[in-house]
Image (spheres, rainbow, N blue to C red):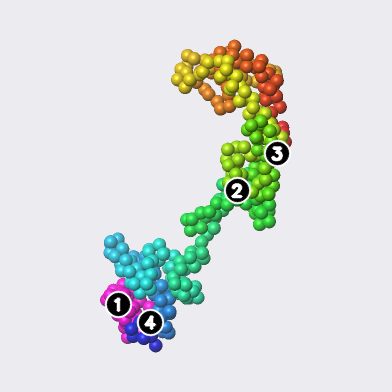
């Protein structure tokens, strides 16, 4: 038999509530919000029934045509629940509680929830659906986003780990994973070696991957390679572009930003005819491309070709920017 003071505490939390001759606790008489109090063996069971039978009324039930009156009704029930249990639930919490515990569908879980001090994570973990969003499905490492209850965490997972989980074929069928050849720019595993370009002399430096801030900096500035051929090629190509910029600055006039907005001023640069195998000069007025050195006249561009002919021929005919250019060629 429940102590009277515990029953009185419950009634005080729901003003106007009554207990009828059938031993039913009725929180709101007109709306018939009730549960059977007489069968409760202890206060823990009362708490379970408050959650199981009043959570719907605290957020969902529509007794009235007026939205305002329904909102007031929901608030009354929510306030009573919070006052009795000593909690601070909101309407979103009530939705979860009703979904998992409403109508006493899972008493063991409800008891566990009460015993935990109303830890919502107990219900959220069960309610959670996990979604994997594949952000970058190329290369040897895949970035994934794990979403749980509107919160997300990003992580990296290797293709080897995907194979262990038996996910590779399923992801391919969904179009989330495709076969990709190595490019030479992928991050290596921890304790493996990668290459960077020494900016002092364009030499190649071997670096061990520790997954630390230094590795991250090298990768973020684009000075990170996992293949010797690619790092050597890029060092040579970058040197050519630097030398061309230097030569233009020493032997030609400047081309200003305002010049680029003037269609009457021609700007010249070097291109290569891959069919007939020779470099030549073209001009533009307004279209500017990255990694292209511009000259104020065709004559200056021709002089630059002569000054760097061998390296330009190499750049246009042999320079391999990524490994799969060779593999797919």
Against 94, is 297 above or below?
A: above
Q: Earlier in the sequence, mark 1 or mark 3?
A: 1
Mark on residue 227? Answer: 3
Q: Quadrant of the N terminus?
A: bottom left
**Residue 125: which disc?**
none
Horizontal side of residue 324 vs 84, given as left or right: right
Dot 1 corresponds to which residue?
A: 12
Q: Nearer the viewer, mark 1 or mark 2?
A: 2
Q: Which residue is mark 4?
A: 37
Q: In the image, which is nearer the foreground, mark 2 or mark 3?
A: 2
The alpha-carbon separation of the residues under discs 2 and 3 comes to 20 Å
Q: Earlier in the sequence, mark 2 or mark 3?
A: 2
Residue, x 53% and y 24% (percent of image)? 288
Residue at mark 1 to residue at mark 2: CA–CA distance: 59 Å
What's the distance in space between the residues labelled 2 and 4, CA to CA?
61 Å
- Start-end of magenta stretch: 7-35
User: Which callout, 4 or 1, points at the residue further toward the start of the chain?
Assistant: 1
**Regarding mark 1 in the picture, which secondary structure is present there?**
helix
Residue wearing tag 2:
212
């Amino acid at each position: 038999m429940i102590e009277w003071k515990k029953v009185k505490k419950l009634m005080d939390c729901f003003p106007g509530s009554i207990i009828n001759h059938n031993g039913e606790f009725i929180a709101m008489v007109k709306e018939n919000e009730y549960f059977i109090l007489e069968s409760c063996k202890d206060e823990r069971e009362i708490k379970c029934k408050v959650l199981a039978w009043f959570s719907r009324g605290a957020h969902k039930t529509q007794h009235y045509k007026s939205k305002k009156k329904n909102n007031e009704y929901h608030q009354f029930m929510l306030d009573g629940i919070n006052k009795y249990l000593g909690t601070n639930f909101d309407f979103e919490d009530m939705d979860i509680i009703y979904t998992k515990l409403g109508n006493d569908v899972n008493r063991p879980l409800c008891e566990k929830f009460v015993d935990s001090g109303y830890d919502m994570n107990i219900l959220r973990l069960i309610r959670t659906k996990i979604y994997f969003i594949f952000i970058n499905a190329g290369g040897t490492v895949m970035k994934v986003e794990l979403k749980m209850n509107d919160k997300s965490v990003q992580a990296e997972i290797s293709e080897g780990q995907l194979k262990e989980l038996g996910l590779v074929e399923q992801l391919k069928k969904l179009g989330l994973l495709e076969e990709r050849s190595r490019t030479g720019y992928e991050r290596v595993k921890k304790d493996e070696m990668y290459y960077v370009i020494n900016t002092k002399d364009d030499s190649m430096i071997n670096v061990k991957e520790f997954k630390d801030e230094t590795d991250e900096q090298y990768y973020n500035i684009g000075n990170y390679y996992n293949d010797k051929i690619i790092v050597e090629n890029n060092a040579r190509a970058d040197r050519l572009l630097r030398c061309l910029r230097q030569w233009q600055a020493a032997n030609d006039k400047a081309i200003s930003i305002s010049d680029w907005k003037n269609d009457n001023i021609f700007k010249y640069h070097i291109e290569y005819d891959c069919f007939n195998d020779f470099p030549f000069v073209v001009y533009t007025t307004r279209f500017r491309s990255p990694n292209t050195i511009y000259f104020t006249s065709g004559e200056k561009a021709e002089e630059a070709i002569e000054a760097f002919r061998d390296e330009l021929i190499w750049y246009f005919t042999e320079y391999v920017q990524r490994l799969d250019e060779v593999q797919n060629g």
